[in-house]
Amino acid sequence: MKKRILSLIAVFVLPLLGLAQVSTIPAEDIDPEDSLVILVDLSALDISKDYVQNLLDDHNNGMDIYMWTWNPYEFPAGHPKENGTGGAAWKNSNELLKMTLVGGTTYSYKMVPTDFYEVDATTVYNKDIEFLVKPKDGGGYGDQDRKSDDLKVLVDPPVTEKKTVFGFPTVIQQDDVFTVYYDNNREEKASMKNLDPNDCYCYVEAELKSGTVVKVANFFNVGDTPELQMEYFDDGQFRLPMVPKDFMPLTPGDEIKTMKFVVMKKVYLTSADRVDEDFDIELCH
C-alpha cells in the first residue's frame, strides 16, 4: 500500500516539477472547502536576487523550509497558526507551517483553505492565497534575508452557468448598448420549449430613481408592440438589443435605477405563456 501511495504522488506531482514557481493539486477549479496541495519549486524562483539564492543555499544545506502567509488571513501573535513565534517571529517560523520536500527543489504544503485560515469560501475567492517561503530563520534585511518573493495561488469562484434569460454586458449605465438574450434550448418549462422564431417577445419595465415605474407596454399588450419582439438570430437563440434611456418612455432628467425583463409568447393568456423567472438588472450611475 505504501508503494502505491508513493506511486500516486509521483504521477500527480512529478509532472509539475520545474514548470512554475507555484503549482497546485488540483491544478484548477480549486474548491476552498476541499483539500489543496500547494507546491513551490525553489529552482524556478529568481535566483539573481540575493535573498532567493540564500534560500536555495539553505535548501542545498538540508535546512527545513516553511510557509509564511498573510492572505486570505494572517493570524496574530499568540495564535497557534501565527507565522512565527517569540519576540523575533521572522527568525523562528512556526513548526505548523513547515513544508514537505517532495523531490529535487520542490516543497509542498497541504491544507483545506477555509479550515486552515478559518474563513469562509467567499473570503478565499476574494483574497486568494498569498505567501512566501523561507527557512526557519529568515535572516536579517536586504542581502541577509533568506526567502522567496511574494507568491500567490489564485482561487477563482466557479463559473456560473448561464441562465435561460441573461444580459450583456453585465454592468451598464442607461446610455450604454445592452442586449437581453433568451436561450430557448435551455428552457425546462414544457409550454415554452421549441418556441417559434416569430413567437418570442419580452416585457420590459424600469424603476426610476424617483420610485416611478415605467413600461413600454402593459403585460397583456406586449405581443401588440413590435419593438418588444425578440430577434431570432440562431438555433433557439433570441435577443433584444437596446439603449435603455432611448428604449424606455423617459422624460428629461429621469434616471433608471433597475430594469425587469420577462420573456413570453406573442399571445399571453396564462403563466404557461412566459418563462418562470424574471430577469432583473441594476444600472450604474
Image (spheres, helix red, strand yellow):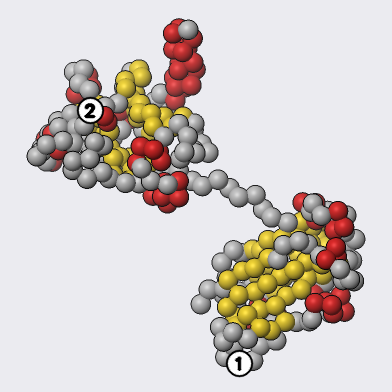
Q: Earlier in the sequence, mark 1 or mark 2?
A: 2
Relative to 247, does residue 163 appear above or below in the rendering?
Answer: above
- For label 2, the crowd category at 10 Å Cα-Cα, with few meaning under 14, some 14 to 19 and many 20 or more, is some
Where is residue 87 drawn, in percent x and y? 9, 39
Mark in front: 1 vs 2: 2
Residue beneath the point at 57% across and 87% down: 210
Q: Is disc 1 placed on a helix, strand or loop? A: loop
Using residue 193 as the reference point, say whether residue 87 is left or right of it.
Answer: left
Where is residue 64 drawn, in percent x and y? 22, 23
Q: Marks 1 and 2: CB-CB under 8 Å?
A: no
Q: Quadrant of residue 114?
A: top left
Residue beneath the point at 78% across and 66% down: 263
Residue where numbered disc 1 is placed = 252
Amino acid type, label 1: Pro
Residue 172 visible in the current orientation: yes
Disc 1/disc 2 C-alpha distance (Å): 67 Å
Residue 24 visible in the current orientation: no
- For label 1, the crowd category at 10 Å Cα-Cα, with few meaning under 14, some 14 to 19 and many 20 or more, is few
Amino acid type, label 2: Glu
Residue beneath the point at 72% across and 62% down: 277
Relative to 159, does residue 143 appear above or below in the rendering?
Answer: above
Residue 99 or residue 232, whichever sits in front: 99
Where is residue 276 drawn, in percent x and y? 76, 61
Residue where numbered disc 2 is placed = 95
Relative to 128, does residue 261 appear above or below in the rendering?
Answer: below
Q: Is disc 2 placed on a helix, strand or loop? A: helix
